[in-house]
Image (tube, rainbow, N blue to C red):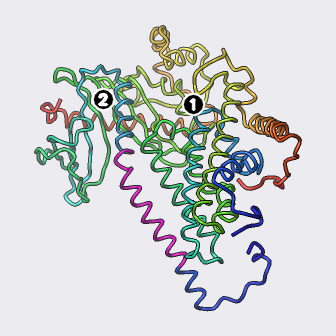
């Protein structure tokens, strides 16, 4: 089975995971879900926790959709996807509240918002609803890891520059560049890291211009 | 398949509608079942960590050492018999015995007995309140009482910590849904420290002002909240001047500041009246 996105032979697990982390990184390439990417990434730990939550929700939702795709009526597929995502988000939300109460107190609000993350529903519609179980699992894993790594990178960048610390451990006195801890600084951080991401990819791929797949991000 | 959005959709038949309804219902049913299982699996741990957080807050507010005993008293209203029921048990205990004391609404003792701690509360008992009593050598060493007050949007839950003579030692806003930056600012440490050191009689007459707070008083309250070594001394030096003055409202949170002050006033007032009734019956539990 081939789709518009992946013509030719079915891609391997490794290709699918690397695709999510680099070629179609949700934040740096597809520019999806930027709002939460800015909101929670003032510290590394917040980014990590939300990233892990998104990874779990993405994999669980993708797998659920691919297993149940025959039962989902095409005319109501988007509402059904939303229900599936909401169920897994609520399950993760309850688990985090039970097992990591201190971290949950800080990012709990954003965990509930994962229901509306554009990246998750777009992978369900574009990939999981058309592909068999194994590729779907690896696509979800790759996209989740891509989002997780992006959040951790942005969180580390902003925490280092904005608060002069890493994972809560102070490294520099005072607040070197408070601007980066503020919301506007979040967008600048993403832009700077996105530029770096593009530059590194250009260099490593020997001048092969990365296809400009994204038409700009929208949605939450 | 990716173009199916563009093609005109066939008209819905009754059969088709039935399939859609079935598909959605199935998704909702399975989802509800999954959530139910997760809830049953995690709720125990969520309660345990919430209780651990409360225990930490109570010990911290009263400055208790490990040797102090802490009992929790829950208050219920039995509307059918028009009685108020108090159940006292060691904090967090799920085994052993809880001491139950029952009063009529006008304060006459109606009964006293031991019930198993952690026993489920029957449906005819409506929760009214909670309080924690710390004791050392059988004598009360301090109280933390949970109070509730009407905030700007929804109830504000607070803990008020008192010495045995009902002087305030600490106050915490445990839960508020008022807006961050506005009403939620009443959780600021320097705001709550304003109540510390006032006696129950002063609290009963307490008012709120929108006047600006004197700089030296604010600095002393911040030092006290940060547990600075000279905090208590600086606070004590200014307390005599300030204790008869009203609470200074947080700018932008006047309604919530009034609500919290009213909550503290009511909590202390109610607790004092209850405690005189209750104390003789709890001596065995302390």
Q: Position of residue B217 (x, y in %)?
A: 55, 16
Q: Quadrant of the C terminus of chain B?
A: top left
Residue B139 appears left or right of A13: left
In the image, residue A42 above or below residue B81: above
Q: Quadrant of the N terminus of chain B?
A: bottom right
Residue B253: image quadrant is top right
In the image, residue A146 above or below residue A12: above
Q: Residue furthest front?
A: A9
Element carrying mark 2: strand
Between A53 and B17, the residue placed more toward the observer is A53
In the image, is residue A167 part of the stretch drawn in magenta?
no
Q: Mark 1: give few (<14), some (14-19) or many (20+) Cα within 10 Å.
A: many
Between B50 and A132, the residue placed more toward the observer is A132
Q: Mark 2: give few (<14), some (14-19) or many (20+) Cα within 10 Å.
A: many
Q: Position of residue B4 (x, y in %)?
A: 75, 77
In the image, is residue B36 part of the stretch drawn in magenta?
yes
- Mark nearest the camera among 1 and 2 is 2
Q: CA distance from mark 1 to mark 2?
A: 26 Å
Subunit that carries the residue with mark 1: B
Element carrying mark 1: loop
Between B230 and B267, the residue placed more toward the observer is B230
Between A89 and B62, the residue placed more toward the observer is A89
Provide the major secondary structure of the magenta segment: helix
Per the rendered image, the range of residues in magenta is B23-46
Subunit that carries the residue with mark 2: B
Please name the residue that numbered disc 2 is placed on: B143
Q: Position of residue A86 (x, y in %)?
A: 55, 60
Residue A208 appears left or right of A18: right
| Residue drawn at (58%, 34%) of the image | A45
Q: Position of residue A142 (x, y in %)?
A: 64, 50
Please name the residue that numbered disc 1 is placed on: B249
| Residue drawn at (50%, 70%) of the image | B28
């Amino acid at each position: 089975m081939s789709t518009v996105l992946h013509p030719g032979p079915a891609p391997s697990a490794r290709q699918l995971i690397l695709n999510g982390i680099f070629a179609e990184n949700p934040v740096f390439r597809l520019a999806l879900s930027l709002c939460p990417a800015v909101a929670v990434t003032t510290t590394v730990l917040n980014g990590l926790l939300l990233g892990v939550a998104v990874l779990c929700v993405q994999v669980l939702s993708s797998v659920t959709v691919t297993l149940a795709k025959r039962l989902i009526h095409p005319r109501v597929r988007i509402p059904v996807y939303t229900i599936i995502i909401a169920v897994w988000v609520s399950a993760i939300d309850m688990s985090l509240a039970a097992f990591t109460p201190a971290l949950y107190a800080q990012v709990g609000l954003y965990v509930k918002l994962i229901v509306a993350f554009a990246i998750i529903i777009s992978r369900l519609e574009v990939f999981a609803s058309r592909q068999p179980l194994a590729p779907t699992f690896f696509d979800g894993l790759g996209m989740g890891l891509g989002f997780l790594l992006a959040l951790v990178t942005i969180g580390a960048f902003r925490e280092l520059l904005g608060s002069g610390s890493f994972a809560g451990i102070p490294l520099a006195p005072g607040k070197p560049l408070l601007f980066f801890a503020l919301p506007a600084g979040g967008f600048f951080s993403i832009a700077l890291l996105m530029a770096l991401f593009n530059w590194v990819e250009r260099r490593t791929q020997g001048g092969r211009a990365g296809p400009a797949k994204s038409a700009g991000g929208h949605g939450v | 398949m990716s173009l199916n959005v563009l093609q005109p959709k066939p008209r819905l038949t009754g059969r088709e509608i039935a399939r859609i309804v079935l598909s959605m219902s199935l998704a909702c049913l399975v989802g509800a079942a999954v959530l139910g299982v997760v809830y049953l699996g995690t709720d125990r741990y969520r309660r345990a960590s919430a209780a651990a957080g409360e225990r930490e807050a109570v010990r911290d507010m009263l400055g208790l050492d490990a040797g102090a005993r802490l009992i929790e008293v829950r208050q219920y209203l039995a509307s059918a018999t028009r009685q108020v029921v108090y159940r006292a048990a060691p904090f967090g205990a799920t085994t052993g015995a809880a001491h139950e004391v029952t009063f009529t609404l006008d304060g006459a003792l109606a009964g006293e007995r031991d019930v198993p701690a952690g026993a489920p509360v029957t449906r005819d008992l409506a929760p009214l309140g909670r309080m924690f009593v710390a004791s050392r050598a059988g004598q009360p060493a301090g109280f933390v009482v949970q109070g509730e007050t009407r905030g700007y949007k929804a109830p504000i839950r607070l803990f008020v910590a008192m010495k045995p003579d009902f002087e305030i030692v600490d106050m915490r806003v445990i839960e508020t849904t008022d807006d961050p930056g506005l009403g939620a600012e009443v959780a600021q440490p320097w705001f709550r420290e304003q109540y510390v050191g006032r006696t129950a009689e002063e609290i009963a007459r307490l008012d709120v002002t929108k006047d600006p707070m004197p700089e030296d008083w604010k600095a002393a309250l911040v030092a006290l909240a940060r547990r600075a070594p000279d905090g208590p001394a600086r606070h004590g030096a200014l307390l005599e001047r300030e204790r008869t003055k009203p609470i200074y409202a947080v700018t932008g949170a006047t309604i919530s500041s009034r609500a919290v002050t009213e909550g503290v006033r009511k909590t202390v007032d109610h607790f004092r009246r209850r405690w005189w009734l209750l104390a003789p019956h709890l001596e065995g539990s302390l």
